[in-house]
Image (tube, coloured by chain):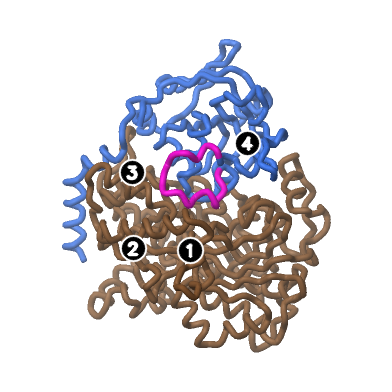
Amino acid sequence: MKPVTRIHSRTAVLLDENIDTDRIIPARFLTTTERSGLGKHCFNDWRYLPDGSDNPDFPLNRPTTRSCSILVAGRNFGCGSSREHAPWALLDYGIQAVLCSEIADIFRGNALKNGLLAIELNEPEHQWLLKNPGIELSIDVRAQTIQLPDGGHIQFELEPFARHCLLNGVDQLGFLLQHGDAITHYEHQQEKAA
Amino acid sequence: MSARTLFEKIWDAHVVAPETADTPAVLYVDLHLVHEVTSPQAFSELRARGLKLRRPDRTLATLDHSTPTLPPKANGERPYTNAEAKAQVSQLETNCREFDVQLYGWDSHDRGIVHVIGPELGATQPGMTIVCGDSHTSTHGAFGALAFGIGTTEVGHVMATQCLLQRKPKTLAIHVDGALSRGISAKDLILHIIGVIGVDGGTGHVIEYRGAAIQALSMEERMTVCNMSIEAGARAGLIAPDETTFAWLKDRPRAPQGAAWDAAVQRWRELHTDEGAGYDSEVRIDASQIRPTVTYGTHPGMAIAMDEPVPTARNAVEQRALNYMHVRPRQPMQGTAVDVVFIGSCTNSRLPDLREAANVLRGHHIAEGVRMLVVPGSEAVRRDAEKEGLHEVFIAAGAEWRIPGCSMCIAMNGDLAEPGQLVVSTSNRNFEGRQGKGARTVLASPATAAASAIAGVITDPREYLTEAAA
């Protein structure tokens, strides 16, 4: 994973609450055996009209939001299935951060492991961002702050290990493999007890 | 030692390295379940790093999501929905051969939906940690196992190390007092619970279901309840193992045998929440008040009794859900016209679920214009159902009797509904497009699904239950 330290972009807003992983990437695109190339199907059935053309009512299709890499979404983003294809699709589509008052557990874990910043905000700040689409934000992972255009900033929480991995591009499997001896010891203890 | 919850006992027993302020706990995984959709990229990662699978003996694979539910053609070819689905299945076959994983594949008499066969084989046992790249892994919590869904990166972690990095979740006790009324099923109960606590009511928590109404449930009913824990956002759902659990597991192929069985049961009897142990939150539900329950919107939290008026939308998002569903507020869901009925999925595809549907259908025919699919959860369920003649009841009623798989629950194998069609489904998710682009899903119990198929509109199944069947 490449280090993620700072993200600067205007925001795109999806007001809907409970945007589930089926909406992010419909199941019929999960027959792939690769991680790449899912961006073209991100929000597929919301983003395209039945004839395959862009749906003008899908907020991210507006010319002003197309290049945005920070997504502000309604409460409980990423609920539903455990498919890691959801963060893969969002990243491939160009989203680098999701800001929300509450993010579903499995999605949040999957997102952070892939360098997609999944940040939970307090309700008032989240509501303010939902009501002010298109503003310029600068997210600083080290300082755990979001810089606002008026000079103010929002402080956010980030699980310390996830933050460490993001800042240093740490591979979590490498970290786990370092526990090889402890795992072997645990297995021996279990075998003795059984 | 101080009083602990069931969750804490299982958690503590699996900590390889404790969590600190800077790092999550290293948690040992007893059983890793694998299927074709969320595993290929993890196997590729192992291959790229030159790693072996640490414990093939603690890993079990099956084919369920992308698999066709129609039989092979005359030339022996399976009718895959596309070449990619076929390639995905053959990739898992290759991966299991290369990494020495036992695959319950096309040639196995035990193949089926991963959350149906784990328990059937006795691989799922009390006190275990169980994971799978599938959010409905929560199903196995019915046995008093800590079981949860993980992403594909984590699938790779478990393959390489048999461990996961986890922060300890919070606990939520759901006490279900009283008894379910006649003709009310576990599906009505869990839909009601999610309707009460909300689609994110369990986020960050492991739920423990307890109380008289839970203890009275069969294992299959407990699986239905725990299965849908994720639909309330919970990491997992748990029910303390008891005599019902032990009787169900005894003599299953992967369960301990002989003296090992007796020793295991003795250990398992300790798996309950101690007197005085506290939960982070608690909810009380009165089982006796629950009526046949269905969803009316586009997430499982939008659930009400079918005879209750649909609530008025409180905001634009809820209005969008009602518009998508073509549902009018202040009118009940009962009586809504039905196009498709689906009986199956890891929520409701076990033998008692099929019996429940067949008891309603026996002697009836489904309404004209309704299409009905019945998809058993596993080859074992299919065999047992056919032995009892349940398939004949379904076929005589005008339903299609298919071979096991996830089928129309996730609709990635070609079994799907057309845009605009209303599906009464025994599955677990009513998200927009879940059962086909533009398809509208109403989640319900097998009995409700069967009654609605007969009447052609959403119907209270108690109208069809005979004294003997109820």
Res B6 seen here:
no
For the record, the magenta segment spans A25-40
Q: Residues within 10 Å of mark 2 (few under 14, many from 20)?
A: many
N-term mark: 3 or 2: 2
Same-subunit check for callouts 4 and 2: no
Task: Pick the quarter of the image with the C terminus of chain B.
Answer: bottom right
- Residue at disc 4, secondary structure: loop
Q: Residue at x 44, y 54 (%)?
A: B37
Q: Amino acid at mark 2?
A: Leu
Q: Residue at x 49, y 29 (%)?
A: A96
Q: Where's residue B288, x and y in %? A: 66, 69
User: In 3D space, how far apart are the residues under numbered discs 4 and 3 (Cα atoms)?
Assistant: 28 Å
Residue holding disc 3? B165
Which corner quadrant of the image does residue B31 belong to?
bottom left
Q: Where's residue A94, x and y in %? A: 52, 29
User: In 3D space, how far apart are the residues under numbered discs 3 and 2 (Cα atoms)?
Assistant: 21 Å
Res B319 seen here:
yes
Residue B60: mark in rendering: 2
A45 up-or-down from B74: above or below: above
- Badge 4 sits on which subunit? A
- Which numbered mark, 1 or 3, is in the foreground of this view? 1
